[in-house]
Image: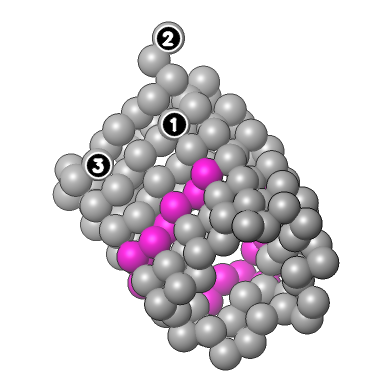
């Protein structure tokens, strides 16, 4: 079984439909493309552990990412993310979240609500004006 799919630097403007039919995927790497949107179908990849979407042109993320309960590493660094939906939360079992080099001004109120296992959080080089009230008590494993 091929549990990894690496489509890095392929000049993709959208995620190919066949990706969402590979529901056994554990590792999906879409680094360095021209993606502007991640479809809600991402939730079909229930076994995904690693999702690399860095170095694209994403301006937001679907709330359906929270449904990826096996996801441990999420990298959306170096995109154009300005605002996240008010309902956006990090997936439950996420260990590493990289959001650096975007244009994020504010995090959703419940961004960290399910993030008990989060160890690495990179929000550097953004335009953050405000963090959710007292998120740190919800992140006991943050290093």
Image quadrant in which you'd find residue 87: bottom right
Q: Are marks 2 and 3 in contact (CB under 8 Å)?
A: no
Q: CA distance from mark 2 to mark 3?
A: 20 Å
Q: Which mark is residue 103?
A: none
Q: Is residue 60 left or right of residue 30?
A: right
The N terminus, quarter of image: top left
Q: Residues within 10 Å of mark 2 (few under 14, many from 20)?
A: few
Q: Earlier in the sequence, mark 1 or mark 2?
A: 2
Q: Secondary structure at mark 1?
A: strand
Q: Residues within 10 Å of mark 3 (few under 14, many from 20)?
A: some
Q: Which residue is mark 3?
A: 8
Position in image of residue 127 (x %, y %): 46, 85
Which residues make up the magenta segment? 73-91
Q: Which residue is mark 2?
A: 1
Q: Which residue is mark 1?
A: 27
Q: CA distance from mark 1 to mark 2?
A: 12 Å
Q: Are marks 1 and 2 in contact (CB under 8 Å)?
A: no
């Amino acid at each position: 079984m091929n549990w990894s799919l690496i489509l890095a630097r392929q000049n993709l403007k959208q995620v190919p439909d066949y990706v969402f039919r590979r529901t056994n995927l554990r590792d999906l790497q879409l680094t360095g493309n021209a993606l502007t949107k991640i479809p809600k179908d991402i939730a079909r990849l229930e076994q995904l552990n690693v999702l690399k979407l860095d170095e694209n042109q994403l301006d937001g993320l679907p709330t359906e990412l929270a449904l990826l309960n096996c996801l441990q590493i999420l990298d959306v660094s170096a995109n154009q993310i300005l605002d996240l939906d008010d309902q956006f939360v990090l997936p439950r079992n996420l260990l590493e979240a990289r959001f650096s080099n975007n244009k994020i001004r504010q995090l959703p109120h419940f961004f960290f609500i399910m993030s008990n296992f989060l160890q690495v959080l990179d929000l550097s080089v953004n335009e953050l004006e405000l963090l959710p009230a007292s998120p740190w008590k919800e992140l006991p494993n943050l290093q």
